[in-house]
Image: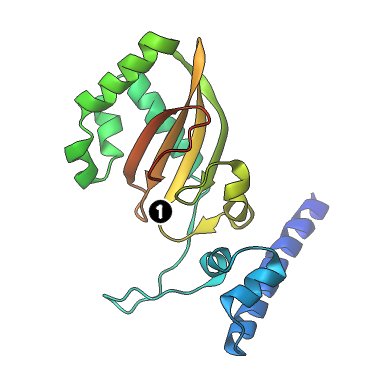
Amino acid sequence: MDKILSAQQAIEDAHQQLQDAVLEARANGSTWADIGQVLGISRQAAFKRFGKPVMPTTGETMSQRSVDQYPDLAQRFFTNVANGNEEATMSMLHHRVREELSWDVLSSVWAQALSEQGELEGFENTFVTAPKGTSPEAGLLQKLSRKMLGVAVVVTTIKQEAGELQGRVAFDNDDAIVGVYYLPVGSTDFQF
């Protein structure tokens, strides 16, 4: 067990050393493109991982949040819909989204999925990514850092008796659902 704890501490120390090195490079005039190139990622990915954006309305530094809980939350959401649990389902939605995604809409979409592919059996290949991410590789940075700014999207394969669907759930900074998709597996035409 000591080896495991030591290895975990080494990982945390390495993350901190990398964070410090990036901040030092930025202070010395390196661009996000320079940093991204060294790390083998885009400048946007470098900024998302290491940047410290400031909320213009408050002047406060925006902080990254953990995305570890989102796969479970997304699966719980889809399970609540499948089980007909209106109260639990609707409580997960952002209040503005509830106006457009009523229980009637959510339950009717699931009823169509049921009629075509049968009961929910489980989930597979669940991962967190940024909006428009389509594969686990697109969410690799989030998998490594397990933190991000802005909207986090969970993508999962919804396993049913006779087929599969791709489920996409977008979460805001307050862990409220701001978007939901049920799509054919392999779909690439979506807003988030």
Disc 1 marks which residue? Answer: 151
- The answer to which image quadrant residue 36 occupies is bottom right
Instruction: Give percent across and percent down for residue 125.
Output: 59, 32
Q: Residue at x 59, y 83 (%)?
A: 26
Towards the viewer: 38 or 123: 38
Towards the viewer: 31 or 70: 31
Q: How is the image coloured?
A: rainbow
Towards the viewer: 183 or 79: 183
Instruction: Check the image and report above or below for 165 versus 35.
Output: above
Task: Name the amino acid type tagged 1.
Answer: Val
Q: For the view shown, which residue lies furthest in the front direction?
A: 189
Towards the viewer: 87 or 24: 24
Q: For the view shown, which residue lies furthest in the right direction?
A: 3
Q: Secondary structure at mark 1?
A: loop
Instruction: Give percent across and percent down for residue 145.
Output: 60, 58
Q: Residue at x 69, y 64 (%)?
A: 40
Q: Residue at x 48, y 38 (%)?
A: 188
- The answer to which image quadrant residue 12 occupies is bottom right
From where the camera sits, is residue 81 visible? yes
From where the camera sits, is residue 13 visible? no
Instruction: Check the image and report above or below for 96 versus 167.
Output: below
Q: For the view shown, which residue lies furthest in the left direction?
A: 99
Q: Residue at x 36, y 52 (%)?
A: 172
7 displayed left or right of 17: right
Label 1 packing within 10 angstroms: few (<14), some (14-19), many (20+): some
Instruction: Give percent across and percent down for residue 45.
Output: 56, 63
Label tally: 1
Instruction: Give percent across and percent down for residue 43.
Output: 57, 69
